[in-house]
C-alpha cells in the first residue's frame, strides 16, 4: 500500500467494532496516527479487546449522536482523513429496534458530517454504508453505483437514508458549487459481505458457523441458498483506504458512491460458504436448514465493482476460498490459545506482501 498513510492523521468512528478494529491495526502498520471515536465494543468477546487495539489508537468512548462531544473530539485531533464506520449494522437487530437503527445510521451520519463541516482544514471523508442500500429487484447481476437506492428492511433503508444525508452535505457544503471549493472530499463506500477472524457479531453467518463448528455441530441456516458478495475484511479495508487516498488528492474527481465487492465467481450461496469454512473442522454435515420463520432478507445480492477496479486500481486480492481459509485459520488459532493480535498482524503482513492486482479492463 501507499506511503501516503505514514504520519497521516486519521479519525475513525466505530473503531471498537470488528471492521474498525482490523482497520486500526492496518493503519498502525502503515504508520498512520489514528484517533477512534465509538461506543464500547459491541460484543463479548470482541476483537478490540482480544487484540489490544487500544494500544495503537487514541480512543474516545462516545456516541456519534452527541454532536458537541463528537465535534470537540474531532476538532482537537484535526484529522486529514475521516473514516465513518460507526453504525447499527445487523439486519435482524434492526427489525427488533428500528428507531435505534435509524437514529444511529441517519442522525449519527449527519452528526459526523456536520463535525467535518466545521473543520478548518482540508479533509477526505469516506462514509461507509453497505451493498444493501440498493432497491433490490432480485437481479442476478451486480448493482452499479447509478442504480436506485431503496431498502425494504429497516437496516437497508437506514443506510440508504445515510447515503442521501451524505449527498446533501456534499452538494450543500463540500462541492465547489456550494462555495466549499473542494476543501472536503466526501465519498460513500458500499461493500459486500465482509468476513474475517475476530468477528463475534450476533446473527451473522461467520460467528454462528464458527461457534457451531467449535462444538462439533452443523450450523443452522435460515437461507442456505441466499447469495452474497463475500470478501475478506482486509480486501474491503484496502478499498476504503484507496478511496480515501484518491479523495485526498482529487476531492472533486472521486466524490460520490463507490462499490467494493469480489469477482463474480466469488458471489456464492450461504451453504457453499459454510461448507468451505467447515472443511478444516471435519464437521459433516456442515449445515442443516432452520425450520423457524424469520423476517424478510434478500435472496440475491451482488455489486458491480468495475468502477473501483478501473479508477482506483482496486480489486480483491484474496479469492473466496483463501478468504475463508484465513478466517477459519484465525479462529482455530485463537481457540487453540494463540494471541489475537499476533494472528491479525500475521495476516496483515501476508496481505501486504501480495502483489497488487493490476487494473481491470
Image: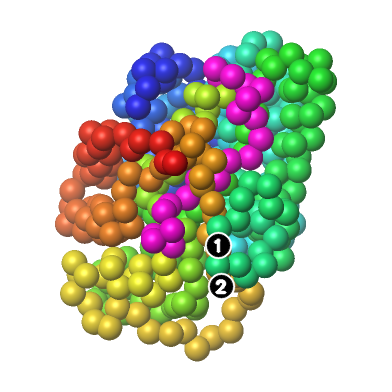
Tell me the CA gap for discs 2 and 1.
13 Å
Q: Secondary structure at mark 1?
A: loop
Please tell me which residue lies in front, 132 or 249. Answer: 249
Q: Is residue 153 left or right of residue 303?
A: right
Q: Position of residue 53 (x, y in %)?
A: 37, 35
Q: Earlier in the sequence, mark 2 or mark 1?
A: 1
**How many neighbours does mark 2 have within 10 angstroms: few (below 14), some (14-19), or many (20 or more)?**
some
Q: Secondary structure at mark 2?
A: loop
Q: Position of residue 139 (x, y in %)?
A: 60, 67
Identified at 22% across, 70% down, the residue is: 279
Q: Is residue 92 visible?
A: no
Write down the residue under mark 2: 299
- Residue 141 is marked as 1
Indicate whether residue 301 is drawn in magenta: no
**How many neighbours does mark 1 have within 10 angstroms: few (below 14), some (14-19), or many (20 or more)?**
few
Please tell me which residue lies in front, 307 or 224. Answer: 307
Outermost residue, front side? 361
Identified at 68% across, 32% down, the residue is: 112
233 vs 8: above or below = below
Chain part drawn in magenta: 248-267
Amino acid at each position: 500500500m501507499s506511503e501516503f498513510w505514514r504520519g497521516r492523521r486519521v479519525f475513525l468512528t466505530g473503531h471498537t467494532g470488528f471492521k474498525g478494529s482490523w482497520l486500526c491495526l492496518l493503519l498502525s502498520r502503515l504508520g498512520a496516527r489514528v484517533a477512534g471515536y465509538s461506543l464500547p465494543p459491541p460484543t463479548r468477546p470482541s476483537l478490540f479487546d482480544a487484540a489490544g487495539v487500544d494500544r495503537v489508537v487514541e480512543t474516545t468512548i462516545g456516541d456519534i449522536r452527541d454532536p458537541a462531544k463528537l465535534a470537540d473530539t474531532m476538532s482537537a485531533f484535526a484529522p486529514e482523513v475521516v473514516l465513518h464506520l460507526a453504525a447499527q449494522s445487523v439486519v435482524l437487530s434492526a427489525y427488533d429496534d428500528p428507531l435505534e437503527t435509524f437514529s444511529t445510521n441517519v442522525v449519527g451520519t449527519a452528526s459526523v458530517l456536520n463535525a467535518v463541516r466545521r473543520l478548518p482544514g482540508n479533509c477526505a471523508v469516506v462514509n461507509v454504508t453497505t451493498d444493501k442500500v440498493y432497491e433490490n429487484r432480485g437481479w442476478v447481476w451486480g448493482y452499479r453505483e447509478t442504480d436506485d437506492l431503496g431498502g425494504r428492511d429497516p437496516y437497508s433503508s437506514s443506510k440508504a437514508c445515510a447515503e442521501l444525508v451524505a449527498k446533501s452535505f456534499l452538494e450543500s457544503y463540500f462541492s465547489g458549487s456550494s462555495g466549499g471549493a473542494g476543501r472536503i472530499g466526501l465519498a460513500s463506500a458500499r461493500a459486500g459481505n465482509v468476513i474475517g477472524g475476530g468477528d463475534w457479531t450476533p446473527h451473522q453467518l461467520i460467528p454462528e458457523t464458527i461457534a457451531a463448528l467449535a462444538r462439533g455441530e452443523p450450523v443452522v441456516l435460515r437461507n442456505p441458498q441466499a447469495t452474497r458478495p463475500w470478501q475478506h475484511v482486509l480486501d474491503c479495508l484496502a478499498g476504503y483506504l484507496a478511496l480515501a487516498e484518491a479523495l485526498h488528492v482529487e476531492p472533486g474527481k472521486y466524490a460520490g458512491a463507490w462499490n467494493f465487492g469480489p469477482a463474480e465467481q466469488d458471489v456464492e450461496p450461504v451453504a457453499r460458504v459454510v461448507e468451505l469454512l467447515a472443511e478444516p473442522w471435519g464437521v459433516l454435515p456442515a449445515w442443516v436448514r432452520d425450520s423457524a420463520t424469520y423476517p424478510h432478507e434478500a435472496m440475491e445480492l451482488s455489486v458491480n465493482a468495475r468502477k473501483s477496479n478501473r479508477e482506483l486500481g482496486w480489486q480483491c486480492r484474496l479469492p473466496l476460498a483463501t478468504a475463508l481459509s484465513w478466517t477459519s485459520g484465525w479462529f482455530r488459532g485463537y481457540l487453540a490459545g494463540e494471541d489475537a493480535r499476533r494472528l491479525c498482524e500475521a495476516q496483515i503482513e501476508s496481505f501486504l506482501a501480495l502483489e497488487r492486482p493490476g487494473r481491470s479492463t
